[in-house]
Image (spheres, rainbow, N blue to C red):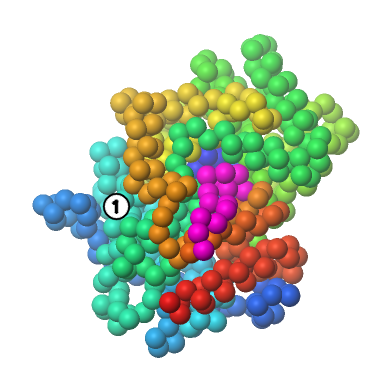
């Protein structure tokens, strides 16, 4: 069965997740790490880091001294480049399994080689193999939060410094996407433990409604061809009209190769179906031309240029037909026979609280959106090409999947508390750099202008989600190479402070 967790996947970085077959996984493989004209030499950086799984003992609840329960958290080490007295680079895991490929490839290893750093990566609680509880019941998920995750980082850092003789080393936090936010917040909340942070593509501002995501998608499509988002909008409008007539459902089922005959009984059914199809464009835009090869992802050859080329191809029929053809291309790319666009099936999988659930990863992350972040990529803005999945559709999922008490009001309160806890756009600390790409829709919730000399932004025109973290290659845009260089020079300077 093909599962659709597009919203979940559109947030991931640094992990490889097989919970779906109808979306583009967030990270992927490896090609040439060569880069010209910057500080990076033309040699492939092969860290030869260990992929051995190591385990660290954590408390289940860091904020309740009376709770003595513990669990084992997975981590990885690469000491290939470490020189005595060198810094410690600390890669923060996020909303999926920690991928050991990052211990062998990536820009941070280039920095580590130059600066003599020890590299550590810690998997986020409740993701991957780091299971603090016997299952993912809603009761147990109350121990899943950014605050608990930051406390995990703090305890890990303290113990590692003691046991590995790193008390005098300066620690640098790295992360991309949600882990990028954690990197910034780690520096904010535990400045005595972490010297600096690289917070890539980090949505540091929580927001219940995030229609700006699709606004950036529209602009990114238009950067390829001005007619592209207009044709997508026309296709979306046509599809929305067809959904009003049940007589069209058989044709829609065939056009999009659905696993089951299309049934629209509630607004949630239609919204889920429409979001699933829009996700083809959202996912491609978010990771457009990112060098994710080293993580094993397929489909990186499908870019904005490919999608817009198909939308502009009149030989494929009307815009609706071209939209459907893109859906079939995505299925073919990921070797899928059909697309499961059933909200009923989605709920069944998301309600499965076992660690072996097909929605593992998605169940945890959506819970965090319901209780901390929001981030709902709605169609509520007129300045974007899609229709049919407004904010109430996203909010209702929280009650449907977890607890009816999770409502628009409680989510709004939780988001406000998150911004009060961390500062949102107005984060105030020091020695954090915020790289973001102009194509990446998540930059709308990130820091794209310098807050201060000690909180600089690196806004990279023409690049997508976390592009600066991936290995360099020949065809990288010049500004991407310069951005990597700029981050390196900042680290070099901050390590002297």
Looking at the picture, does residue 275 appear above or below residue 155? above
Say above or below: 418 vs 192: above
Extreme residue toward the left, this view: 66
Q: Quadrant of the N terminus?
A: top right
**In what quadrant of the picture does the C terminus appear?**
bottom left
Farthest residue to the bottom: give it.
Answer: 84
Q: Nearer the viewer, residue 334 or 166?
A: 166
- Is residue 351 in view? no
When asked about the image quadrant of residue 300, the answer is bottom right
Left or right: 50 in relation to 32: left
The kind of secondary structure element at disc 1 is helix
Q: Is residue 221 visible?
A: yes
Magenta part of the chain: 440-453
* 23, above or below 251, in the image: below
Q: What's the magenta bit mostly, secondary-structure-wise?
A: loop
Residue highlighted by disc 1: 148
Q: Work out whether residue 209 or residue 32 is closer to the camera in this orientation and state it.
A: 209
- Position in image of residue 103 (x %, y %): 49, 71
Q: Residue at x 71, y 43 (%)?
A: 220
Q: What x and y, as percent, mark residue 243?
A: 64, 17
Q: Residue at x 26, y 72 (%)?
A: 159
Residue 165 location, quadrant = bottom left
Residue 408 point in image, percent of width and height:
39, 26
């Amino acid at each position: 069965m093909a599962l659709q967790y597009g919203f979940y996947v559109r947030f991931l970085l640094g992990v490889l997740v097989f919970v779906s077959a109808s979306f583009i996984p967030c990270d992927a493989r490896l090609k040439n790490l060569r880069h010209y004209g910057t500080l990076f030499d033309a040699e492939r950086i092969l860290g030869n880091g260990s992929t051995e799984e190591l385990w660290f003992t954590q408390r289940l609840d860091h904020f309740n001294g009376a709770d003595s329960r513990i669990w084992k958290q997975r981590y990885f080490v690469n000491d290939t480049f470490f020189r005595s007295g060198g810094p410690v680079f600390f890669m923060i895991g996020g909303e999926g399994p920690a991928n050991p490929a990052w211990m062998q490839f990536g820009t941070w290893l280039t920095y580590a080689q130059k600066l003599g750093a020890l590299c550590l990566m810690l998997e986020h609680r409740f993701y991957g193999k780091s299971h603090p509880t016997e299952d993912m019941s809603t009761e147990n998920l109350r121990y899943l939060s950014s605050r608990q995750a930051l406390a995990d980082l703090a305890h890990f850092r303290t113990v590692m410094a003691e046991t590995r003789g790193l008390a005098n080393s300066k620690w640098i936090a790295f992360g991309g996407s949600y882990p990028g936010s954690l990197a910034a917040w780690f520096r904010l909340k535990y400045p005595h433990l972490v010297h600096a942070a690289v917070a890539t593509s980090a949505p540091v501002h929580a927001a219940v409604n995030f229609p700006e995501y699709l606004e950036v998608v529209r602009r990114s499509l238009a950067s390829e061809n001005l007619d592209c988002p207009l044709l997508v909008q026309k296709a979306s409008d046509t599809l929305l009209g067809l959904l009003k007539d049940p007589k069209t459902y058989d044709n829609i089922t065939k056009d999009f190769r659905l696993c089951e005959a299309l049934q629209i009984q509630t607004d949630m059914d239609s919204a889920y179906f429409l979001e699933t199809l829009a996700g083809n464009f959202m996912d491609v835009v978010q990771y457009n031309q990112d060098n994710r090869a080293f993580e094993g992802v397929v489909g990186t050859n499908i870019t904005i240029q490919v999608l817009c080329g198909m939308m502009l191809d009149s030989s494929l029929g009307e815009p609706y037909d071209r939209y459907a053809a893109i859906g079939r291309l995505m299925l073919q790319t990921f070797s899928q026979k059909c697309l499961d666009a059933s909200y009923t099936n989605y709920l069944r999988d998301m309600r499965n609280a076992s660690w072996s659930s097909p929605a593992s990863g998605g169940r945890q992350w959506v819970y965090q959106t319901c209780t901390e972040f929001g981030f709902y990529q709605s169609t509520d803005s007129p300045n974007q090409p899609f229709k049919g999945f407004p904010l109430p559709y996203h909010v209702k999922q929280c009650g449907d999947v977890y607890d009816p008490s999770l409502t628009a009001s409680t989510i709004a309160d939780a988001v406000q508390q998150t911004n009060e806890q961390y500062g949102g756009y107005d984060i105030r600390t020091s020695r954090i750099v915020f790289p973001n790409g102009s194509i990446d829709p998540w930059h709308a919730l990130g820091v794209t202008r310098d807050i201060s000399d000690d909180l600089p932004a690196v806004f990279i025109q023409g690049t997508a989600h976390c592009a600066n973290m991936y290995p360099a290659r020949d065809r990288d845009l010049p500004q991407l190479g310069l951005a990597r260089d700029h981050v390196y020079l900042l680290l070099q300077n901050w390590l002297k402070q």
